[in-house]
């Protein structure tokens, strides 16, 4: 008889009972082992994550110690050292004993700043830090010193719940200036005693603000003092422009001034006009006797152009440092030289209109309302010293300045501009009105890239509604915004100790900090 199944696959054979139970038991053991392994792995994973979390928390606490300690130090130095009064003897001591003199100078100017301790807690975490400073090197700049000091900040951070701490350290450098400082080192100075509350009220009332740059630890601010900063004595710049020895205002007689300008000997006053100083020593600067109706600064190819207009006459100075070539056109004729003049212009009178311009195809120079057109050639450090009031009518732009996110950066530029009104006659020393003003007809979005000093007469913006942007510095005996705003952007080159060669200096020795740099960050 034929079977309906195969005997080998028949599942209900009596001698094979219990096979399913054994299989289930084996599978149970396998899955139980896998489950236990997963539980063990999960436990290890939780422990590792907890360790990572606690380690991260400690990292945060230690890192906060460095960051907050650095912020605290920068705020203290920025508030106390812009600028601090020091004795001339203390500055001179740096020449003989730089390291010891530096420690004494810091103590005298800033008090017990170092070591600087800081501690703070938040949310069960606590961090603390200590900052120390040590002298590294000194650069003698004549009337002032550029001092570089090493900075080290050590911090520890921990959790009160964990009972553990972690340590971090920061290596950096500090840049100080000591002596009679170049005024461009001070972003904004007003000759007046002010408390911190009065400074804040002044900035708010006058519409002055400071534009910080990303990464800048040292923020620009307002410094104020009744004396010791501004000076009306620009005798050194005048003497340099005239190629004569150092003198004080009032010592320059008409006869001596005539001799310096190459005029015929006489005791009569120098006639009004524009004079390019030249003698056996070469070319000096430019001396303007009397006021100017207009002074226009322009760049033409590789040449710096300065146009002077007064009483219906024109004088044009064009010089190229790269080609060592100078052309001076006057109402009487033209002169050419295979030399370049000193970039110093002395105006013994007022300047009714100063601004940037351009040179057209016919060689005519006109003032122009164009914030993108350079006024000062790359490589030229131009200094303009006026005895009386200077009125700015248009943009003053340095070649090589770049904009990033609407903020100007001068780090890559080698152009410099100093505008100074002394309020004192360059020859006789008699007092003048002085001052620097933005003209009512100037562009509403005026851009100025210069160090501006008004030793007398103050600084004012004539006409409301203007938004003036200043890349550089402003120092004045007074300030009047008249409903306009002023945005001050610090020149990047200040941090490196780079200043215009003929910039005015502070009247008395001062100590100031110009840079704080982070060089290395360590975790251990």
Image (tube, grey):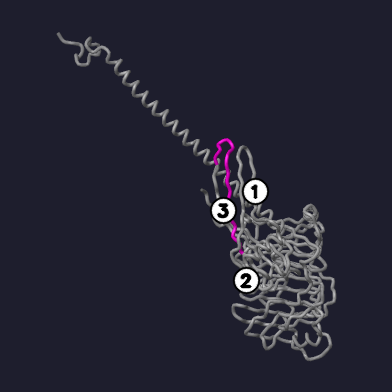
Nearer the viewer's eye, disc 1 or disc 3?
1
Specify which label sits upstream in the sequence, 1 or 3: 1
| Occupied quadrant, residue 227 | bottom right
Q: Residues within 10 Å of mark 3 (few under 14, many from 20)?
A: many
Q: Is residue 184 visible?
A: yes
- CA–CA distance between discs 1 and 2? 45 Å
Q: Nearer the viewer, mark 1 or mark 2?
A: 1
What kind of element bears circle 1? strand
Residue 280 within the magenta-colored segment of the rendering: no
Tell me how far mark 1 sits from mark 3, CA to CA: 14 Å
In the picture of the structure, the residue carrying the numbered disc 1 is: 118
Could you tell me which secondary element the residue under label 3 belongs to?
strand
What residue is pinned by disc 3?
Answer: 170
Q: Residue at x 69, y 73 (%)?
A: 502
* Residue 260 to residue 68: above or below: below
* Magenta range: 148-164
């Amino acid at each position: 008889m034929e079977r309906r199944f195969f005997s080998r696959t028949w599942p209900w054979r009596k001698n094979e009972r219990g096979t399913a139970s054994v299989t289930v038991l084996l599978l149970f053991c396998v899955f139980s082992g896998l489950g236990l392994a997963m539980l063990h792995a999960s436990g290890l994973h939780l422990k590792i994550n907890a360790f990572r979390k606690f380690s991260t928390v400690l990292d945060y606490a230690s890192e906060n110690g460095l960051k907050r300690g650095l912020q605290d130090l920068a705020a203290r130095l920025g508030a106390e050292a812009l600028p601090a009064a020091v004795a001339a003897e203390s500055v001179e001591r740096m020449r003989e004993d730089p390291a010891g003199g530096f420690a004494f100078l810091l103590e005298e100017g800033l008090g017990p700043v170092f070591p600087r301790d800081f501690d703070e807690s938040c949310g069960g975490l606590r961090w603390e830090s200590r900052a120390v400073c040590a002298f590294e090197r000194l650069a003698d700049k004549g009337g002032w010193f550029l001092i570089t000091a090493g900075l080290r900040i050590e911090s520890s951070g921990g959790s009160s719940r964990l009972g553990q701490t972690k340590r971090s350290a920061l290596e950096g450098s500090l840049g100080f200036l000591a002596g009679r400082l170049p005024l461009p080192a001070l972003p904004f100075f007003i000759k007046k005693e002010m408390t911190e509350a009065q400074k804040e009220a002044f900035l708010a009332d006058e519409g002055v603000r400071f534009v910080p740059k990303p990464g800048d630890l040292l923020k620009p601010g307002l410094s104020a003092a009744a004396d010791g900063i501004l000076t009306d004595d620009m005798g050194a710049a005048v003497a340099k422009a005239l190629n004569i020895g150092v003198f004080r205002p009032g010592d320059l007689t008409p006869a001596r001034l005539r001799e310096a300008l190459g005029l015929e000997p006489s005791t009569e006053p120098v006639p009004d006009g524009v004079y390019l100083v030249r003698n056996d020593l070469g070319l000096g600067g430019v001396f303007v006797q009397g006021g100017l109706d207009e002074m226009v600064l322009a760049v033409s190819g590789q040449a710096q152009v300065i146009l002077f207009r007064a009483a219906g006459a024109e004088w044009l100075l064009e010089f190229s440092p790269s080609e060592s070539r100078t052309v001076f056109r006057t109402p009487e004729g033209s002169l050419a030289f295979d030399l370049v003049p000193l970039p110093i212009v002395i105006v013994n009178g007022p300047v009714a209109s100063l601004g940037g311009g351009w040179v057209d195809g016919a060689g005519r120079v006109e003032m122009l309302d164009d914030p993108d057109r350079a006024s000062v050639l790359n490589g030229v450090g131009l200094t303009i010293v006026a005895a009386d009031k200077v009125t700015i009518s248009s943009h003053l732009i340095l070649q090589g300045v770049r904009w990033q996110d609407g903020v100007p950066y001068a780090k890559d530029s080698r152009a410099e501009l100093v505008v100074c009104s002394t309020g004192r006659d360059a020859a006789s020393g008699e007092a003048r009105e002085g001052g620097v003003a933005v003209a009512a007809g100037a562009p509403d979005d005026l851009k100025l890239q210069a160090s501006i000093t008004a030793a007398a007469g103050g600084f004012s913006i004539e006409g409301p509604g203007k938004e003036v942007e200043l890349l550089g510095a402003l120092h004045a005996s007074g300030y009047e915004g008249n409903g306009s705003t002023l945005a001050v952007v610090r020149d990047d080159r200040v941090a490196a100790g780079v200043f215009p060669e003929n910039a005015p200096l502070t009247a008395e020795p001062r100590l100031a900090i110009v840079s704080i740099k982070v060089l290395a960050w360590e975790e251990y």
